[in-house]
Image (cartoon, grey):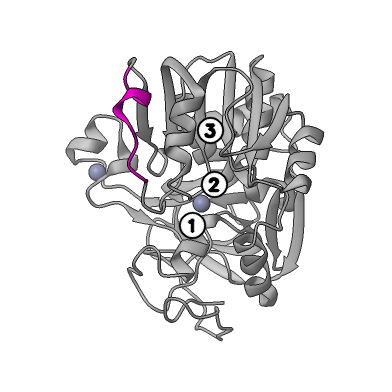
């Protein structure tokens, strides 16, 4: 399935089988989880870098052929959003390959996993944790990895708020609870199903995102893409609290009084991920163990999955099943 033009449905295309170049693997895709970034790409909220492009950056499958050394044919591996970093720019040298000047991204600069076959640079692939079937592993690769980076950026917190309770939040809630944090889930006003889902998954409190928090939070992560959540989250955190914006795109942030930032509150974004984030998270996941709630769709029904994500109907992660 490809994005040919922004703001149009994805279309099914027969493309030539990709061939692995030196240092790459050819992967037979078993499943690919759907990310809000895929929606931003399809909806033209972030500009296309190539067209057509096969979206999908939470790819899990099996190595079918290798032109590298790291993996064997038959290995179960995953591909995430970061597809390449040059290793030499000032950001890479500072351990910030997520900001690499030459960075490339899966399902955006390179064709991704809404497909039967994909090639990837073997240095940017990850062995899947054992014990995770493909379907449960796929959402770990972005919702998990970038959510984990955002969670680390939020710093130590006894009380942490999650704005938007979708794929990333339902995964990172388990990391937070494992670390002894109290989790407050903020969802769209009136979305009782989302509140219920958050409570079932272990949130300590769930309520409407634009309402005041029941008690001052130490940190908040904004997973949703609505700019109005930024002032809401700043109002919810205590002095010195941190608000992390975890998405790649957000609607404009309404102006807000300086008083809600004053008091040494920190407002920051998280961009992309480093391979170290991935190694750390994929090592941690089976020790908790993190469980993902997935609804599955066939690859050819990718538009339906994206529509359900757009309308907020998905509780947990949507995963496309392929092989
Ligand atoms: Zn670089
Ligand atoms: Zn993503």
Q: Residue at horizontal 48%, vertical 74%?
A: 18
Q: Does any portion of residue 260 appear in the rendered image?
A: yes
Q: Secondary structure at mark 1?
A: helix
Task: Answer few, some or many: residues within 10 Å of disc 2's Cα (few below 14, many 20 plus, some between 14 and 19).
Answer: many
Majority SS type along the magenta span: loop
Mark 1 or mark 3: whose residue is earlier in sequence: 1
What residue would you read off at disc 1? 37
Note whether ligand 2 is within 8 Å of mark 3.
no
Note whether ligand 2 is within 8 Å of mark 2.
yes
The quarter of the picture where residue 27 lies is bottom right
What residue would you read off at disc 2? 142
Q: Nearer the viewer, mark 1 or mark 3?
A: 1
Label pair 1/3, CB-CB below 8 angstroms = no
Note whether ligand 2 is within 8 Å of mark 1.
yes
The quarter of the picture where the N terminus appears is bottom right
Percent x, y for residue 61? Answer: 64, 57
Mark 2 or mark 3: whose residue is earlier in sequence: 2
Percent x, y for residue 111? Answer: 45, 68
Q: Which mark is residue 148?
A: 3
The quarter of the picture where residue 276 lies is top left
Residue at the far left in the pictured view: 90
Q: Which mark is residue 289?
A: none
Report the side of 234 relative to 10 (left or right). Answer: left
């Amino acid at each position: 399935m490809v994005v040919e033009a922004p703001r149009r449905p994805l279309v099914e295309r027969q493309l030539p089988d990709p061939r692995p170049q030196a240092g790459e693997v050819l992967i037979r895709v078993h499943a690919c989880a759907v990310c809000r970034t895929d929606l931003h790409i399809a909806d033209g909220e972030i500009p296309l870098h190539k067209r057509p492009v096969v979206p999908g950056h939470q790819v899990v499958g099996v190595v079918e052929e290798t032109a590298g050394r790291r993996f064997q044919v038959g290995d179960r591996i995953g591909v995430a959003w970061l597809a390449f970093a040059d290793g030499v720019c000032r950001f890479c040298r500072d351990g910030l390959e997520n900001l690499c000047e030459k960075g490339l991204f899966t399902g955006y600069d390179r064709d991704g996993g809404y497909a039967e076959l994909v090639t990837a640079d073997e240095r940017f692939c990850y062995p899947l944790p054992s014990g995770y079937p493909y379907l449960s592993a796929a959402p770990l690769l972005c919702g998990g990895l970038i959510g984990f980076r955002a969670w680390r950026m939020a710093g130590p917190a006894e009380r942490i708020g999650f704005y938007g309770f979708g794929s990333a939040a339902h995964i990172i809630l388990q990391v937070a609870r494992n670390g002894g944090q109290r989790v407050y889930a903020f969802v769209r006003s009136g979305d009782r199903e989302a509140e219920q889902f958050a409570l079932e998954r272990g949130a300590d409190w769930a309520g409407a995102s634009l309402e005041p928090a029941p008690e001052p939070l130490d940190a908040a992560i904004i997973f949703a893409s609505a700019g109005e959540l930024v002032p809401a989250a700043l109002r919810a955190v205590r002095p010195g609290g941190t608000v992390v914006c975890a998405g790649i795109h957000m609607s404009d942030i309404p102006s807000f009084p300086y008083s809600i930032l004053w008091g040494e509150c920190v407002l920051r974004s998280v961009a992309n991920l480093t391979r170290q984030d991935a190694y750390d998270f994929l090592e941690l996941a089976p020790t908790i163990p993190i469980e993902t709630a997935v609804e599955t769709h066939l690859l050819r029904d990718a538009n339906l999955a994206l529509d359900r994500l757009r309308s907020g109907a998905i509780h947990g992660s949507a995963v496309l099943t392929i092989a």
